[in-house]
Image (tube, helix red, strand yellow):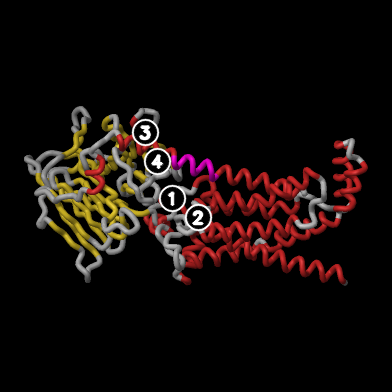
Amino acid sequence: MYFQRIFFILSFVLCSFFLWKAWEKDRNIFTQSNVIKENSLINKFKTRLHVLKDSDVCIQTDVFNIIIDKNSGYIKSAKLLKYRDEKDSSQYLNLLRTDANYIFQMKTGFTEINNVNKLTHNINGIYNTKKKIYQLLPLHNKLIVPMTFITKNGIKFVKKIIFHRGRYDIQIKYHVYNNTKKNFKVRIFGECIQTVNPFFIDNDNLNINQYRGISYSSDNDKYIRFELNDISNNKESLYKRIHTGWVAMVQKYFASVWIPNIDFQPNTIYTKKINQNTVAVGYHNSSICLPPHSFKEFHSKLWIGPKNQIEMAALAPNLNFTVEYGFLWFLSQPLLNCLNMFHSILGNWGFSIILLTIIMRLVMYPLTKSQFYSMARLKSLKPDIDYLKNKYKNDPKRMSAEIILLYKRKKINPLSGLLPVILQMPIFLSFYYTLTNSIELKYSPFIFWIKDLSSYDPFYVLPVLMGLSMFIGQKMNTSNTFNNDISENVQEKMMLLTPFFFTIFFLWFPSGLVLYYLVSNIFNLIQQRLIHINLNKNKKK
């Protein structure tokens, strides 16, 4: 009885949590939609293709279509060729863009330091390139794009942007040639610049950001984040010297990251407010003094792409933390690692979820067995409990005390069967965060009508089957447990209504999450049936 009551309470809390999450998402979309209505130009910027200008350099690899402005050397557009704006769209996802109402650019360049008053200014110039279009050829694994400009006083700056086949990390080599007769003090910088409140909203699930902001990692901080609005409203700022680390603009599935070279230490990471609606996060290295007629080489790395945890973790320490898994990240990450391993074998994320669910249920079998045995022992005490209830029906406190004494005499803990349920709650929530925040599972099909495990079942088959399996389990658990007491009959009806409420909530949950819960319920029913058969055999003996 106590187990069912607590299970009902936990079910209510869980349903309330996901209802709040759904309301929060709808509220955010509604707020952004109001902004759209106030701007009549929005539809033009959602569909407009970027037209190459004379100052543009186009770079195409197997994963990128990037446009660099020769006037500044900045990356002003980056399309990801393996991702679409929408699931069935013909348009590639434009992660970086430069429009009239929205700017998201990656800037890098050189800063000169005045030796007299320590003033600094960025060195701007028109870069020269040998070609207007660079393309990674089929038999090549590397593409190098050199960009050069020379100042009036003869200092030569060269940037070599290096792309690799199948990779989203970009290497940048900076060469500075001091061809003058004076010392020249210089440092390199990299920045991510983004509009805080864009006047558009993307309809696809790839670009609706549960979190859009700034994050960084430093020597003492593995992962820190804060919102873009905190920078524009002067609530937060960053200026920190680091020996290792990175800075990034992050969103739900993608990240744009600068990783300074550790050879020039310390580096400085910072944020700055460009105007009321535009902020920047970036880094600059320690200044280097070049003697006359000398040469210096610098390095940095840049990531523009999806939050692939394995690749990001190999690129820089703690970079995989940009994948937002909430307070249960320590469970979500191992779950994804297991799913990745199973997917490499099975080749299907849905079957990988089923296999992982079965393994977890087998691991938890001793607890499940203990749960059912505890419930069976509680059922055996039903006549004694009914006797105590009738005897002390006018004295509720005495009745509760006597029931507790009965449990102690029989060495039964009425809450012992609750442990498997408590353990499943964080696993369930971890699966939710894993499915909704991992780019690996986005647009991943299962079988037949399930085309995207991170989205809801379009025909609601899985939620209905899940609710049915939950109802059968509840029916088995409540049978022979309640008596004719009115309050307990009400409780029984409420318990049997729980699957209905869960089915309603699960209608719009990720189908991968519903699949996990359905398989878990079915496996639980099989275990429960086997345990009951074993109990009946023991009784006959």
Q: Which mark is residue 229?
A: 3
In the figure, is residue 97 to the left or right of 498?
left
Report whether residue 499 is seen. yes
Q: What stretch of residues is rendered in magenta?
A: 18-26
The answer to which image quadrant residue 450 occupies is: bottom left
Q: Earlier in the sequence, mark 4 or mark 1?
A: 4
Q: CA distance from mark 3 to mark 1?
A: 20 Å
Q: Earlier in the sequence, mark 2 or mark 1?
A: 1
The answer to which image quadrant residue 398 occupies is: top right
The picture places residue 215, in percent across and down from the top left corner, at 39, 42
Q: Label 4's element?
A: helix
Please name the predominant secondary structure of the magenta segment in the image.
helix
Task: Write down the residue under mark 1.
Answer: 323
Amino acid at the residue labelled 2 = Gln
Label 2: how many residues lie within 10 Å, few (<14), some (14-19) or many (20+)? many
Q: Earlier in the sequence, mark 3 or mark 2?
A: 3
The picture places residue 391, in percent across and down from the top left corner, at 93, 42
Task: Write down the residue under mark 4.
Answer: 29
Task: Write down the residue under mark 2.
Answer: 333
Residue under the point 41% across and 37% down: 226
